[in-house]
Image (spheres, helix red, strand yellow):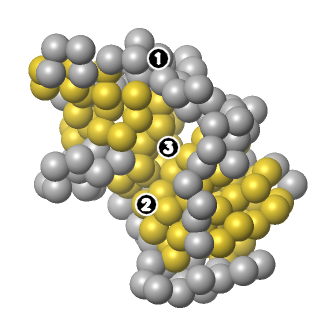
Amino acid sequence: DRGSDWIDLAADQKTLYYTSEGTKIFKYDLSTSTQLTDFTNLGNRLFALRLLGDGTIIAANENNVVHFDSSGIIIGTYLDRAQLLFGLNIAPGGTSFWTAEYSTGDVYNVDIATGTVLNHFDINTGISGVSLLGEITVGGPGPGTPVPEPGTMMLLGSGLVGLVAYGRKKFRK
């Protein structure tokens, strides 16, 4: 829908997975500059995606966060009551993720294995990104790598969370 939007690099350091705010997760081979076969076509718009260490992928979409196996088959969903989940990142430790609603300002920390909501709060305005200090990356160097400074930082029980509110508003909690 928009070229590339959210991207993540696989552990092989050459396969790039990305969304474009459309219905597909795409793959691109950086070593050969070749578009690969689509990873999946969900049918709902996909936004943030993250590769997990076990070869699976989680992605935020219009209705929930979807967990795909390594072949693109849905193996789980989280937060089915959501309105429009947009940002998504893996928490330090790799066992949970943080996501936020673009339109409502609800922020969630969810356990990947069980789907249990570990933390939830509302900043009463839409959020267009979630950034975590020490966030887990599959293809990158991982914890200790600098994360771009977001508009707001929060220290919660499971780590430092950065939120970027849409518009030009900044919030501190």
Q: Answer left or right for 138 relative to 156.
A: left
Q: Earlier in the sequence, mark 2 or mark 3?
A: 3
Element type at mark 1: loop
The residue indicated by pointer 3 is 77
Residue 103's quadrant in the figure?
bottom left
Residue 36's quadrant in the figure?
top left
Query: Tag 2: residue type?
Result: Phe
The residue indicated by pointer 1 is 11
User: Looking at the rendering, in which quadrant would you find the N terminus?
Assistant: bottom left
Q: Give the camera-side residue of 118 and 125.
A: 125
Query: Tag 3: residue type?
Result: Thr
Q: Give the camera-side residue of 12 and 63.
A: 12
The residue indicated by pointer 2 is 86
Q: Position of residue 23 (x, y in %)?
A: 22, 48
Q: Position of residue 159 (x, y in %)?
A: 79, 51
111 to 166, vertically: above or below: above
Q: Earlier in the sequence, mark 1 or mark 2?
A: 1
Q: Residues within 10 Å of mark 2 (few under 14, many from 20)?
A: many
